[in-house]
Image (cartoon, grey):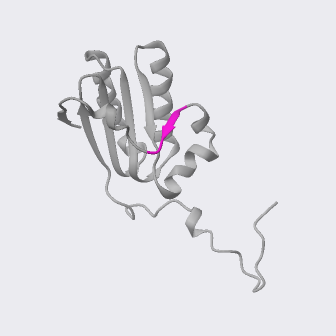
C-alpha cells in the first residue's frame, strides 16, 4: 500500500525518513581504544562508504592483539548506509571463526532504523549502552 494522502490532497511529510543531505550531519570521526581484551570503535557523524577503509584498518588490529571483544559504539552516529552496515556484518561473520565477539551499541534516532529495516539486528548483539565492566583496565588510544 502506498503513502496515504492527507485531507489537503498532499502527501505526508516524509523528510524524517530521508537520509540527511550530504554534509548535513556531523563530520565522521572514529576513535579507537583498546583495553586488555576489548577493542572499542567509537563513531560520530555519518558512517558511510567513504569511512569503510578507516574502520577496516582498525579491525586489522584484532588479529595482532589479545582482543576477545570488538565494540562498535554507534551512539553518536547520525546516519549509517548499507556499506557501513555490511562492514559490521562482515566483522561479525569473521568473529564466528575467530576468538572474539562483536557487540554493537545502537545508534540513536533514525540511524537505528537500518538495523530494523534490514533485519541485521537479528544477526548482531545489539545493546543500548556500553557495559561498565567492559571498560575495566587502562586504554591504549590509537588514531584511526
Q: Residue at x 46, y 20 (%)?
A: 94
Residue 127 included in the magenta stretch of the image? yes
Whole-percent x, y for residue 123 in the image: 58, 31
Q: Residue furthest front?
A: 133
Q: Position of residue 16 (x, y in %)?
A: 56, 66
Q: Is residue 40 left or right of residue 85?
A: left
On the image, which quarter does residue 40 sit in? Answer: top left
In the image, residue 99 lies at what x, y percent?
40, 14
User: Quick one: quadrant of the N terminus?
Assistant: bottom right
Residue 99 sits above or below residue 106 on the image: above
Q: Name the main secondary structure of what is drawn in magenta.
A: strand
Q: Residue at x 29, y 22 (%)?
A: 37
- Give the magenta-colored segment's residue range: 124-128
Drawn side of residue 96 relative to residue 129, left or right: right
Residue 125 x %, y %: 51, 33
State how many labels appear: 0
- Residue farthest to the right? 1
In the image, 67 versus 120, the foreground residue is 67
Does 111 sit above or below residue 115? below
Residue drawn at x 24%, y 30% is 34
- Residue at (76% x, 79% y) in the render: 6
Q: Is residue 17 above or below residue 144?
A: below
Residue 89 on the magenta span = no
Amino acid at each position: 500500500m502506498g503513502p496515504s494522502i492527507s485531507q489537503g490532497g498532499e502527501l505526508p511529510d516524509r523528510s524524517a525518513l530521508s537520509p540527511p543531505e550530504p554534509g548535513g550531519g556531523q563530520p565522521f570521526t572514529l576513535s579507537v581504544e583498546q583495553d586488555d581484551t576489548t577493542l572499542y570503535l567509537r563513531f560520530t557523524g555519518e558512517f558511510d562508504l567513504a569511512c569503510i577503509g578507516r574502520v577496516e584498518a582498525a579491525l586489522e588490529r584484532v588479529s595482532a592483539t589479545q582482543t576477545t571483544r570488538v565494540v562498535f559504539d554507534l551512539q553518536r552516529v547520525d546516519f549509517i548506509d548499507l556499506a557501513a552496515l555490511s562492514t559490521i556484518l562482515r566483522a561479525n561473520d569473521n568473529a564466528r571463526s575467530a576468538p572474539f565477539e562483536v557487540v554493537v551499541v545502537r545508534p540513536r534516532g533514525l540511524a537505528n532504523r537500518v538495523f530494523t529495516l534490514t533485519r541485521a539486528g537479528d544477526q548482531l548483539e545489539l545493546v543500548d549502552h556500553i557495559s561498565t565492566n567492559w571498560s575495566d583496565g587502562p586504554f591504549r588510544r590509537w588514531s584511526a
